[in-house]
Amino acid sequence: MVIKNHYQIIQKLVEATKKHEVYRRTECINLIASEGLKSPAVCEMLSLSQDLECRYAEGENDLEGHVKTRHYQGQKYVTKIENFTIDLIKNLFGCAWADIRLVSGTHANLATFKGLSLATKNNRMVVAPLSSGAHITHDYSGLAGKIIGLETINHVFNVTNMNIDPDKSAMIIRASRPGIVTFGGSLFQFPHPVKELKDVAREVGAYIVYDAAHVLGLIAGGEFQDPLKEGADFVTASTHKTFPGPQGGLVFANRDDERMKTGIKKIQYSIFPLTTSNTHLGRFPALGLAALELRVFGRELAKQTIKNAQTAGEYLFERGVKVLGADKGFTKSHQIAVDVLQFGGGKIVAQKLEDANIILNKNLLPYDDQHHKDDPSGLRIGFQEVTRRGFKESDVKHLCDLILLIIENKRRPSEVKEDILTFRNEFDEIKYGFQSVHEAMDYAQAHQL
Ligand SMILES: Cc1ncc(COP(=O)(O)O)c(C=O)c1O
């Protein structure tokens, strides 16, 4: 499009931006499982770091994760900011090394998979099947295969349990002898069998990578499996899903022996110089503050998030909806998977719900034809954002009632939208977080944190 009138375009840009803020922030109930809601304190911290948004800090880090060398001038505060944030993250996850220079979960996987394939000189990786919840970055058809050139081999997945089958996957790992065994995923209700497979991975010389993009906040709260304690070597993640920080990525690990040091060094090399120049410094202070929030509120937030997801699973199931993982209590994470084929399929149902200002996403289920991405039979529903807005079990049930009215065609979405707007208005405050940077500092001081 040739722009003839820049004034008009900028005016429209401003208008669309403002409208978006009102729409998604105040008028919708957001149930996308991969999104997170930042507290006022974290937002304030972001607003304090505008100059950082302009700067560069290329260079090398040491085996603590701290800044070692920088190739730019003007770093006297930037270095402190990166080191303080690293320490807050290491403290939260009880690990010896972390790197926050990744700009997203995708970037964290890119650098980690690349680094570990260099460390092992092995191009094979065992991953969950894409159809059963792995992220596209794990798959041969995405970053792992097309960008890094890894050959991916699938874990065996048990659809009834919605989990990796440890015995059958052990056979796969032994037969394929990969350099990396990956756990974690995007459709991810139940802890993966890390402790059951860690010895098998070791036996074949593979590193275990655990992709905690979705469940990082639950891990921080101590309410999901602790991947490092269970035997994972590296944890990769996004910092903006159940971990309600600024958009970014993260990788962390312990550093017990030469094998781990080699892995860390290769990942660091893959971060810089291989895949990073600007590390988006403006998010670091806000990431540090989000880490403090999770230290303080993480357990309560994770507990209520999981309780809300389980409540929704059970409530919908009792009303005739096919919720996956019923035998296992529907979920142990922030999300549930629902088969809505009987109501027209994921595409139609997600659109109807959007028409009522309920935002969630359609999702392929393990038994779907994987070529039908555009019209899968499922929905993935995440409860981390509504929990942060203060939803308790009774609120989740009320929301489910409104969802049922729509999907069972008992009321039109446009009518239910009125109820959603009223309901949404009851949850204006963001809980399990600080209202200001000042409040966070006062709290930390008063509690000698
Ligand atoms: C399991 C998993 N890994 C990695 C990613 C990529 O993270 P990001 O969107 O931060 O690049 C996602 C995204 O949703 C994910 O679900």
Image (tube, grey):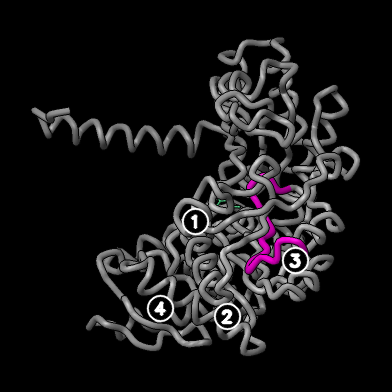
Secondary structure of the residue carrying tag 1 is: helix
- Measuring from the top left, give residue 320's x and y in whole percent: 85, 22
Work out whether residue 57 can be spotted: yes
First in sequence, mark 2 or 1: give its number.
1
The span from disc 3 to disc 4 (Cα, nearest Å) is 26 Å
Secondary structure of the residue carrying tag 3 is: loop
- 2 vs 1, front mark: 1
Task: Say the numbered circle drawn on residue 222.
Answer: 3
Counting other residues with Cα less than 10 Å from the Cα at mark 3, is it few (<14), some (14-19), or many (20 or more)? some
First in sequence, mark 2 or 3: give its number.
3
Secondary structure of the residue carrying tag 2 is: helix
First in sequence, mark 4 or 1: give its number.
4
Residue 302 occupies quadrant: bottom right
What residue span does the magenta drawing correspond to?
Answer: 174-188
Q: Nearer the viewer, residue 352 or 405?
A: 352
Q: Nearer the viewer, residue 256 or 46?
A: 256
Task: Say the numbered circle drawn on residue 445.
Answer: 2
